[in-house]
């Protein structure tokens, strides 16, 4: 049983790089990068690969998820993007559910800055 997506799609050597490149509409460099880091494949591309290889899409998605969990660089990138997204909600008028601990309404921020601002005389 293949442990990686690359092993699964290369199983039996039925398809060449050129076959995958034509079916996915991508260049050789992008294909090799996506094979090295399967999180770069879109769901539509994974569906194409599943259809070509005759494996269920869920199996490919499970392999991609498992590889992402094993790859510390992907985990760091995901964590960084999540923190950046959470940082963008600060100052919004309405907090998204679950982010109220990092949320400060814009009106309260403005009131705090006005209260602390020294008066010019």
Image (tube, helix red, strand yellow):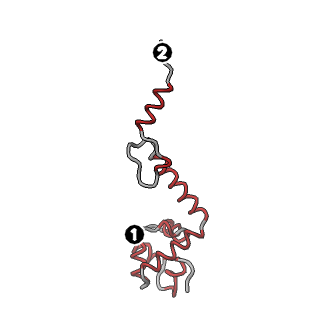
Asked if 9 appears above or below 79 in the picture, the reply is: below
Tell me the distance, in whole angstroms, between the alpha carbons under discs 2 and 1.
Answer: 64 Å
Q: Quadrant of the N terminus?
A: bottom right
x and y, in percent, of residue 66 in the image? 55, 73
Q: Secondary structure at mark 1?
A: loop
Q: Quadrant of residue 80?
A: bottom right
Q: Which of the pair 97/34 is nearer the observer?
A: 97
Q: Residue at x 47, y 26 (%)?
A: 115
x and y, in percent, of residue 119 in the image? 48, 18
Q: Quadrant of residue 23?
A: bottom left
Asked if 92 appears above or below 35 in the picture, the reply is: above
Q: Which of the pair 2/106 is nearer the observer?
A: 106
Q: Secondary structure at mark 2?
A: loop
Q: Are marks 2 and 1 in contact (CB under 8 Å)?
A: no
Q: Which mark is residue 78?
A: none
x and y, in percent, of residue 25 in the image? 40, 69
Q: Residue furthest top?
A: 121
x and y, in percent, of residue 97 in the image? 42, 54
Q: Residues within 10 Å of mark 1 (few under 14, many from 20)?
A: few
Residue at image mark 2: 120
Mark closer to the chain start, 2 or 1: 1
Residue at image mark 1: 25
Asked if 121 appears above or below 57 in the picture, the reply is: above
Q: Residue at x 46, y 68 (%)?
A: 41
Q: Which of the pair 39/35 is nearer the observer?
A: 39
Of circles 2 and 1, the one toward us is 2
Q: Which of the pair 13/63 is nearer the observer?
A: 63
Q: Residue at x 49, y 80 (%)?
A: 9
């Amino acid at each position: 049983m293949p442990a990686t997506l690359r092993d699964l799609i290369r199983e039996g050597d039925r398809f060449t790089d050129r076959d995958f490149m034509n079916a996915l509409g991508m260049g050789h460099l992008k294909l090799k990068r996506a094979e090295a880091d399967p999180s770069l494949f879109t769901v539509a591309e994974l569906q194409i690969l599943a259809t070509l290889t005759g494996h269920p899409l869920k199996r490919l998605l499970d392999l991609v998820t498992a590889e992402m969990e094993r790859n510390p660089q992907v985990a760091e990138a995901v964590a960084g993007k999540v923190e950046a997204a959470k940082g963008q909600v600060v100052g919004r008028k309405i907090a998204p559910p679950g982010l109220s601990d990092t949320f400060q309404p814009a009106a309260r921020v403005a009131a705090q800055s006005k209260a602390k601002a020294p008066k010019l005389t």
